[in-house]
Image (cartoon, rainbow, N blue to C red):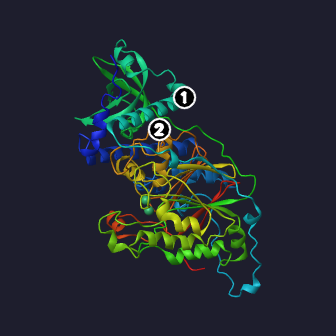
Amino acid sequence: MEKPFFVEGEKRVNRILDTHITVSTERKQKEAKRVSEGTSLQKAVSFTLASGYQLDKEAFDFLNNIAEIEDPLFLIEEAVKKIGDLPQKPLFIDRVFLETMRKGPCAEEKLPSPVPSPSTTESRKTFRPYAKDVEDQVKVITDPTKKICTTGTITEYLGYFQDRFERLKKILQKRIDAKNAVPISVALKAPLKSKLNVIGMVMEKVESKGKLFVRIEDLETSATVFISSNLSREIIAKARSLLLDQVVCISVVKGKSDLLIAKDFILPEVPQKTLHKASEPVYAALTSDIHVGSKKFMEKEFSRFLECLKGNRGNDKLREFVGHIKYLVIAGDIVDGVGIYPDQIEELAISDIFEQYREAAKLIAQVPDYIEVIIIPGNHDATRKALPQPALLKDYAEPLCEARKIHSLGNPSTVSLHGVDLLLFHGRSLDDIAAVAPNVSFDTPEKSMKLLLQNRHLAPIYGERTPIAPEKRDFMVIEKIPDIFHAGHVHVLKCNQYRGTLIVNSGAWQKQTDFQQKMGLVPTPGIIPIVNLQTSKISTLDFTEAW
Ligand code: FE
Ligand code: ZN
C-alpha cells in the first residue's frame, strides 16, 4: 500500500481559512514573552559575572526595563566587547554606559557626522570617485525568476511542504547532535523510556491547563510531544519560540502509548562563519522601501542622497567616502503601488502605477553609471505577491530598465558582490514573526532576521500574512549562509551580527504613514547603511538633515 506523506498536509493547507491556535493566542504570546524576558535577563546577568564584571543596581533596573523591547543579553555582550577595548576596565557596568551602547541604529562604527559643504564649489577638490576605476564583480548566485511554475493545487502544496521538509532535514542531519535522528514512526514503536532524536515539521502548539504540547509530523506520520514544566526555563523558552511549519529536531524519551516527551530542541542553526571580504575597499549602499508615489515619500531626502552619490554634496572627507560606493542594493518596495491596502488611494501622490515607475526611473537614472544597481521587488511592487516573487514585471518596470543598467532579480535572491555573498529578501515574513515570536517586535527586525537564520528559512509560518506559492522547490530555505543578510519591509534601520553574518534591515524613504501610526510603528527613514565590503564595517549616512 502506498504510504501517505504529510498525513495532515491538507489540514495545513486549510489552515489559511481558520485561526489555527487552539488556546488564546494573545495569552500564549504574553506568557511566552514573560518567560523568555526572564531567561534573557538572567542570562545577561550571568554573562556579565562570567566576564568578570558586575552590574550596579541602576544598570540592572535599566536592563529589566528594556527586556520587553530588546534582548538584554545582546546589549551586555556588546557592552563587554566594548569594555574589552578600553584601556582602563571598570569593575561595575553602570547605566550610563549601557545607555551610550544603545545609541544609534547600528552598534557598528558610524561615520562622523557629515559637515556642511562649503558654499563655494571652487574650494573643493574635483570629485574622483575611487569606485569609478574599479571593475564591478556582480555574480547572481540564485534568482527564482525563471524557475517559477505553479498552479496552486493541493498536490502542489503537499509537494512544496515535502521539499521544505527534506531540505531542512538534510541541513539538520549535518549537525553532529541530530545526525542519528530517526523517523517519527520508529520513535513511536521504540520501547518505553528509549532516548531518541526525531525530526519533524511543527504542526500545532497546544497549551492546555498549563501543559504545553507540540504536534510534529514527517513524511509518514505525526506525533504529540509533551514539554514538561520540569524542564529548564531555557528549554521551555525554546519550545515556546518554535514557529508553526518550521522544521526542528527534538530529543525525546518514548513515553506511554503514543506520547513523546521532549528533552531538548535542536534548530538547523548556522555555524560560526568567517566573512568573505573584498580585496579592495569598495562599499555597498543597502536600501529598500523607497515608496515612490506615496504622499509620504521623502523626495527631498532621497534627492540629497543622489546628489551625494554624484559628489555634489558634503565636504571632501564625505565625498571621498561616498566615492567608494560601487553597489546600490534595493531590497524591494520601489514604488508604493496601487490597492495594496484599504484606502491607500488617500495616501497616494501618484495614483497610476506606470507613472510611479516612471518617477522611480527618473531617480534611479541619476545614480552614477559606475555604480551597479541591484533591485528585487517587495509586496508593494508590480509582480506576483506570493513568495518567491519573480523580478519586477517588464510592462511596469520598463522605464527603470531603460533609464540605466540595473540587475533586476526576484525575491529572495543571492548575489556575490566583489566576492561577498549577499542574501536579499524583502522581508514580508517579518510581520508574522513579530506577531508570534517571544521577545521580538516590529521595531526589532534584526532579531526576527536572526530567528530566520537559526531556522534556515525565510518564511517559516504558512497561512498568515505572507503568501507563499507552492513551488516544487522551496526557494525560501537558506541553503548557503550569506555574509550579509539584507532585508527591508519594516522601515526600521537595524543592524546586528549573528555568528559572523551581518544582518541589516535597511530602513526606508517614507515618513510614518497613517497605517504605521495606528500600529504604533515609528519608522527611521532617510538614513542609509553602507557596508565596507573589505572590512565588513557598517556606517550610516543620515539625509534627514540638510547638509
Ligand atoms: Fe515598504
Ligand atoms: Zn514591504
Indicate the position of residue 156 as horizontal and vertical percent values. Answer: 37, 37
Q: Is residue 250 left or right of residue 375?
A: left
Indicate the position of residue 510 as horizontal and vertical percent values. Answer: 45, 70
Number of numbered discs present?
2
Q: Nearer the viewer, mark 2 or mark 1?
A: 2
Find out whether the residues at labels 2 and 1 contact each other: C-beta distance under 8 Å. Answer: no
Report helix, strand or loop for mark 1.
loop
Q: CA distance from mark 2 to mark 1?
A: 23 Å
541 or 421, which is in the foreground?
Answer: 421
Q: Amino acid at mark 2?
A: Arg
Q: Is residue 477 left or right of residue 319?
A: left
The residue under label 2 is 473
Q: Is residue 239 above or below residue 4?
A: below
Report helix, strand or loop for mark 2.
loop
Indicate the position of residue 526 as horizontal and vertical percent values. Answer: 52, 70
Q: Which mark is residue 343?
A: none
Ranked by sequence position, the earlier of labels 2 and 1 is 1
| Residue 222 visible to the viewer | yes
- Cβ of mark 1 under 8 Å from ligand 2: the answer is no
Which quarter of the frame holds ligand 2? bottom left
The residue under label 1 is 175
Indicate the position of residue 4 as horizontal and vertical percent values. Answer: 33, 24
